[in-house]
Image (cartoon, rainbow, N blue to C red):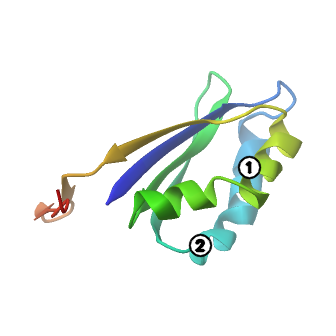
Amino acid sequence: MITAIVRYKLPASIGRDACRAHFEKIAPNFASPKGLIRKQFIWSERGIAGGVYQWESLDDARAFYTGPWLNGILERYGTYPDIEYFETFALTENPGGRVTILDTGK
């Protein structure tokens, strides 16, 4: 499993409420990308927004962050996103504290 953290600087004209409204509007569009397990939409008071994504594979993640998705980010925010990939070794899920150790295949 791959966790990708994506961040980009918002233009000063896009505050918390506008960012939230946009995220609420587009959230259903993330039900179908190949290999996407989960996405958290994030925003900070410093004017940074983005997402924390969990992917089945690095190939799925990299394929998604090109083409239409990247074009949309550039059109809306005028900046390239910072994308960092992490191999996910374990998960703890609450409530219940369920722990899953992932086989990384290496």
Residue 13 in picture, x, y percent from top left: 87, 29
When the figure is inspected, residue 7 is found, relative to residue 24, above or below; the finding is: above
Residue 38 in picture, x, y percent from top left: 45, 65
Residue 33 sits in quarter: bottom right
Q: Nearer the viewer, residue 39 or 94?
A: 39
Which image quarter holds the C terminus?
A: bottom left
Graded by Cα atoms within 10 Å as few (under 14), some (14 to 19) or many (20 or more), the crowding at tag 2 reads few
Residue at the spot of label 2: 33
When the figure is inspected, residue 56 is found, relative to residue 61, above or below; the finding is: below
Residue 45 in picture, x, y percent from top left: 61, 25
Residue at the spot of label 1: 70
Q: Earlier in the sequence, mark 1 or mark 2?
A: 2
Residue 24 in picture, x, y percent from top left: 69, 61
Q: For this view, does 73 lie left or right of residue 46? A: right
Looking at the picture, which amino acid does disc 2 mark?
Answer: Pro
Between the C-alphas of marks 1 and 2, the distance is 14 Å
The residue sitting at 77% across, 45% down in the picture is 73
The residue sitting at 81% across, 52% down in the picture is 72
When the figure is inspected, residue 81 is found, relative to residue 104, above or below; the finding is: above
